[in-house]
Image: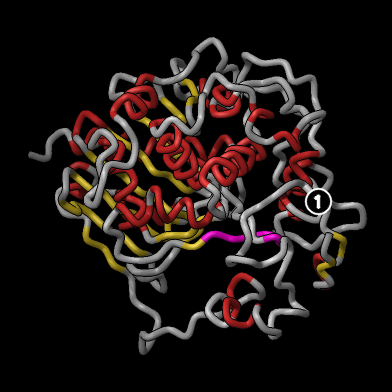
Amino acid sequence: MHADPTPSRATTLVDTGPHPARYPGAPVGEPTIDSWQEAPHNRWVFAHMNELMPVATVSRRAENPGATVRLGPLTEQLPDLVARLEQTYTDAFLVLHGDEVLAEYYREGFAPDQLHLLMSVSKSLCSTVFGALVDAGGIDPAGRITAYVPELAGSVYDGPTVQQLLDMEIAIDYDEDYVDPASEVQAHDRAAGWRTRLPGDAASDYEFLTTLRGSGSVGEFQYCSANTDVLAWIIERVSGLRYADALSRFLWAKLDADHDATITVDATGFGYANGGVSATARDLARVGRVMLDGGVAPRDRVVSQDWVRSVFAGGSREAMTYEGFTKTFPNGSYTRQWWCTGNERGNVSGIGIHGQSLWLDPLTDSVIVKLSAWPDPDTEEWNALQSELLLDVSRALDTVP
């Protein structure tokens, strides 16, 4: 075990099994804030400072950009579109119609090439990497979670299958209340380095996952961000790669992306798969394009057509008892870390708190990206405004040749 004396993370890292090193040969938990300048750590850290401490961007722009408003034919159908984007605190909005960027909007001060936190849209990216490993035969969705991560024996994950993990159909003592300091989701954030640690908190995301308990009963949907990080742990075990590197190899490097993405990491370097990815709107749209193109990216296939079909077919409607979703989408479901509306358009979406959306519209072969900064994480009112806007834009696209 190795100590990490960082003030906000001061603790002893608990051994949760073998994990990919930050760089070849690095001991688990190293380098730390106290050891990073020492050889051989400095060779790696000098090129990865943003994993050890906060960094600020030194912009190449002379001044903050003005607003970009290029909404084309959408304004004919939706003359109040700009007002609705502003009303819902939109930072970036993009419509990819086929292979054409049909519309873009960026608020004043936010540039088209700027990265934006995706929050739980990150889950859908994790699912796509997971699907690639399933397709390759490395993961059996019918297998037990603990067959891949034995360290989870005795936790709530001891018994359920990988597919139940993917579809979030495990009963867990995990309160996803983003504004309650006593909730498990905030404890999860603290273990991952998103909040200041409190006495008794887990020292790493890995350790936090081993502490989760619950009935473990299966068959009913329960949204739980921890599930995605368990998926990422399985990805690491099967691929032998750090999650960030697996996300690159199996997805991002195949997109022909304009920019690198980023992902936040904990004290061990484990990527926060459930919500820590940042990317540009254009590059995120490329992920949606992969799904609409049956799993194929510009540089290589990412996932099989069967995996994509399973997503668009939706999950169990019987399992979906979350009224916050079924109130708007009565036939809705959740599968493979995607929200499936079950509506007549077949819309499927990656969704993140504070207004992040990766919305797929198969009827018009379009991807809609909306990256926002709602004042509240997640309310019925904000979700209703967002869903109505995305549906109206989808319908407006029906008239676009």
| Residue closer to the observer: 313 or 145 | 145
Q: Residue at x 39, y 43 (%)?
A: 358
Kindly tell me whether residue 110 is visible in this rendering: yes
Q: Residue at x 61, y 52 (%)?
A: 272
Q: Which residue is mark 1?
A: 15
The vertical placement of 319 against 182, above or below, is above
Q: Amino acid at mark 1?
A: Asp
| Residue closer to the observer: 284 or 357 | 284
Asked if the magenta segment contains residue 184, the reply would be no
Point out residue 351 in the picture as x, y percentages from the top left corner.
48, 40
In the rendered view, does 350 fall on the left or right side of 176?
left
Q: Residue at x 41, y 24 (%)?
A: 341
Q: Residue at x 82, y 38 (%)?
A: 211
**What kind of element bears circle 1?**
loop
The vertical placement of 242 against 47, above or below, is above
The vertical placement of 27 against 366, above or below, is below
Asked if the magenta segment contains residue 266, the reply would be yes
Q: Dividing the image into 4 quarters, which one contains the C terminus?
A: top left
In the image, the segment drawn in magenta is 263-268
